[in-house]
Image: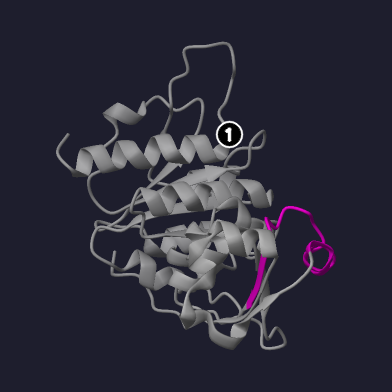
Amino acid sequence: MGGPRRRRRLRARPEVTREQIYGRRPVREALRGPREVLELWVTERALNAEPWLREPGLGTRSRVKAERDLTEAAGTRDHQGVLAWAEPYRYADAYELAGGDSPLLVCLDQVTDPQNLGAVARTAEAAGATGVVVPAHNAARVTPAVVRASAGAIEHLPVAVVKNMARYLAEVKGPHLWAWAATGDADTPLWQADLTGGIALVLGAEGKGVRPLVRRTCDASVSIPLAGEVESLNVSVAAGVLLYEARRQRNGG
């Protein structure tokens, strides 16, 4: 099979001019990331607690506001006294991610919980994954809640959106990239799976799992053997286990 077909990069929706980011670590990571932070609101308490909020480079973007102002603007009390507006998150090109040298992709099949997407993104970034791919429909996208759940890690991790996950996997898999569906009933445990080359780890929503068509499109299935009474792991935990097994194998461990 030939190399993956190129697609134009999916841009942020043109009508969205800026997006919220809240929480101390998410905002700090946004300031370190590629998108521009346009405005920053901080409370006196946060300003006194976090030296980085007093750095001269923030300039006129930073304004001291009351706690209630941040809560009202963010729609949550979970802002930790720091709220920012940044340019919209720009999604990566899924085909470019798959076309790199030995890519390590996490493909989430209809994972709708923003907390799960954020947690997966945090683990994927820490494990050195190439990126995360999600379907355009019935799936969580990058939102302020997802950024918060990722502790800002998603600011440093490419996330791509595809119209059809099964079709995408069919187009990109081949000698350079092997697609593994993570399923509880797979005969191959993760330590027997070859995760050293280019791989796409495909995980489904908790309870539903990977959809049948997506699973059939994958080259093989891999399981995480469980020794206790529970029947499954949270998708973010499963992603972490598989990603670090892949990293261990790639490092010759």
Residue 188 falls left or right of residue 81: left
Q: Residue 245 appears in which quarter of the rendering?
A: top left
| Mark 1 neighbour density, 10 Å: few (under 14) some (14–19) many (20 or more) | some
Q: Position of residue 203 (x, y in %)?
A: 52, 43
Q: Position of residue 89 (x, y in %)?
A: 57, 74
Indicate the amino acid at tag 1: Asn
> Looking at the image, which residue is at 45% across and 79% down?
7
Q: Position of residue 161 (x, y in %)?
A: 55, 67
Q: Residue 37 appears in which quarter of the rendering?
A: bottom right
Extreme-left residue of the structure: 252
Q: Position of residue 12 (x, y in %)?
A: 61, 80
Residue 133 falls left or right of residue 73: left
Give the residue number, with chain letter if any, for mark 1: 234
Which contiguous range is marked in magenta?
67-85
Q: Residue 180 appears in which quarter of the rendering?
A: top left
Q: In the rendered view, would you say 154 is above or below 117?
A: below
Q: Residue 9: in sight, yes or no? A: no
Closer to the camera, 8 or 46?
A: 46
Q: In the rendered view, would you say 140 is above or below 100?
A: above
Quadrant showing the C terminus:
top left
> Looking at the image, which residue is at 54% across and 85% down?
59
State how the image is colored.
Answer: one colour
Q: In the rendered view, would you say 151 is above or below 28?
A: above
Quadrant showing the N terminus:
bottom left
Whether residue 212 is in magenta: the answer is no
> Looking at the image, which residue is at 59% across and 17% down?
230
